[in-house]
Amino acid sequence: MKNLFTIIKKPLFTEKGSSLKEAENKLLVEVTRDANKIEIKKALEEIFKVKVEKVATIKSHGKWKRQGKSLGKRPDRKKALITLKKGEKLDFIEGA
């Protein structure tokens, strides 16, 4: 079993994420690449004391980038779109 505090890396603050939060009570967070939906749900419920209805995950592969002669790759990452149950609220900035 993984440590719950290592599964969730950071919240993602984007325009699309903020509109989803206001309209549909959904959160967007970055998680570790090897975490599954059950582990993400359990970590959020135990750390932040909220009820999670649904978890959707998105894998995005890092792009190849050049800087002069050298070639590098941005890291792969995994995002989770979390739907909270009705009446639940979680605000990362204000601390709910």
Image (cartoon, rainbow, N blue to C red):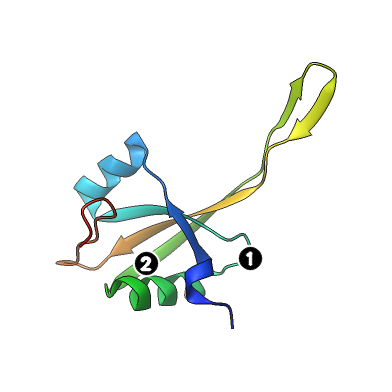
Q: Marks 1/2: CA distance?
A: 18 Å
Quarter the C terminus occupies: bottom left
Give the residue drawn at x 37%, y 60%. 82
Task: Please state which amino acid type lies under the numbered disc 1.
Answer: Asp
Q: Is residue 49 left or right of residue 32?
A: left
Q: Quadrant of residue 52?
A: bottom left
Q: Is residue 47 left or right of residue 90?
A: right
Q: Quadrant of residue 47?
A: bottom left
Q: Position of residue 6 (x, y in %)?
A: 53, 68
Residue 9 visible within the image:
yes
Mark sitting on residue 54: 2
Give the residue drawn at x 14%, y 67%. 87
Task: Please state which amino acid type lies under the numbered disc 2.
Answer: Lys
Q: Nearer the viewer, mark 1 or mark 2?
A: 1
Residue 37 visible within the image:
no
Q: Secondary structure at mark 1?
A: loop
In the orientation shown, which residue stands out farthest toward the bottom? 1
Q: Position of residue 89 (x, y in %)?
A: 20, 62
Mark sitting on residue 44: none
Residue 14, compared with residue 46, is above or below; it is: above
Of label 1 and label 2, which has the lower sequence position? 1
Quarter the N terminus occupies: bottom right
Depth order, front residue of 38/6: 6
Give the residue drawn at x 48%, y 70%. 5
- Residue at image mark 1: 34
Depth order, front residue of 5/20: 5
Q: Is residue 37 left or right of residue 41?
A: right
Residue 83, compared with residue 64, is above or below; it is: below
